[in-house]
């Protein structure tokens, strides 16, 4: 999976016939990886199911737990479940995210949620936090530029 061979990774994951026999931390990672592959294929229901299984088992590394919660928040956003998305994203920030890029993505998502809820002061605060992290990922930079056009006109 790290080398980018998603088909090979999926083949290995599918070769595991009895995931309940895996040790608990390994089983957690197994379900998380299954969820990641399902997300890549845009299969959001199975992605959510697998990610929840992985989170319920408990993550071996705390940073991975934050990243999984962030992904759950993104899934909830895809389903337009704003309340659940906000809950997951706030939890992911509390648990800790592995790098500045993930933190910036979380703050930008919270910013857009706050704009949807018309809580403009909070939206601007999250936007400033995201921008202060100086992310380098092109998608995140593009999102910041998009939001910057609108946020200056917002009262609060």
Image (spheres, rainbow, N blue to C red):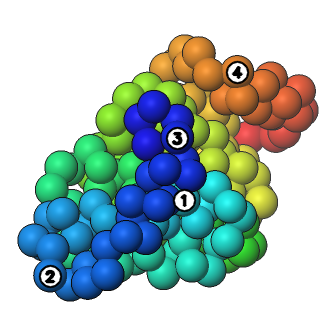
Residue bearing the label numbered 2 = 21
Residue in view at x 54 percent, y 48 percent: 6
Please report whichever mark, 1 or 2, sits nearer to the chain's N-terminal start. Answer: 2
> What is the distance, in whole Å, between disc 1 and disc 2 at their CAs?
21 Å
Q: Are marks 2 and 3 in contact (CB under 8 Å)?
A: no
Number of the label disc, if any, that sits on residue 138: 4
Residue in view at x 55 percent, y 71 percent: 47
Which is in the foreground here, disc 1 or disc 4? 1
On the rendered structure, is 70 left or right of 114? Answer: left
> What is the distance, in whole Å, between disc 2 and disc 3 at their CAs?
26 Å
> What is the distance, in whole Å, between disc 4 and disc 2 at their CAs?
41 Å
Q: Which residue lies furthest to the left in this view?
A: 23
Please report whichever mark, 3 or 1, sits nearer to the chain's N-terminal start. Answer: 3
Quarter of the figure with residue 128: top right
Q: In this view, does 136 lie above or below 140?
A: above
Residue 18 screen position, x and y as percent: 26, 84
Q: Do the residues labelled 3 and 1 touch (CB within 8 Å)?
A: no
Residue bearing the label numbered 1 = 37
Residue in view at x 35 percent, y 41 percent: 97
Whether residue 82 is visible, yes or no, is: no
Residue 106 screen position, x and y as percent: 53, 44
Number of the label disc, if any, that sits on residue 5: 3
Q: Is residue 116 above or below residue 53?
A: above
Q: What is the secondary structure assignment of the residue under circle 4?
A: helix
Which is in the foreground here, disc 4 or disc 2? 2
> What is the distance, in whole Å, between disc 3 and disc 1 at their CAs?
11 Å
On the rendered structure, is 59 left or right of 64? Answer: left
């Amino acid at each position: 999976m790290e080398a980018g061979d998603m088909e090979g990774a999926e083949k290995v994951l599918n070769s595991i016939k009895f995931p309940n026999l895996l040790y608990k931390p390994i089983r957690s990672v197994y379900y998380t990886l299954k969820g990641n592959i399902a997300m890549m294929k845009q299969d959001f229901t199975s992605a959510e199911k697998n990610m929840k299984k992985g989170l319920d088992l408990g993550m071996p590394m705390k940073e991975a737990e934050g990243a999984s919660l962030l992904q759950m928040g993104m899934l909830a956003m895809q389903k337009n479940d704003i309340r659940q998305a906000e809950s997951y994203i706030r939890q992911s920030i509390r648990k800790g995210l592995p790098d500045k890029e993930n933190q910036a993505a979380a703050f930008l998502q919270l910013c857009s949620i706050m704009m949807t809820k018309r809580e403009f002061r909070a939206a601007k605060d999250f936007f400033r936090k995201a921008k202060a992290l100086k992310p380098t990922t092109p998608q995140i930079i593009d999102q910041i530029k998009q939001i910057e056009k609108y946020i200056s006109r917002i009262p609060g």
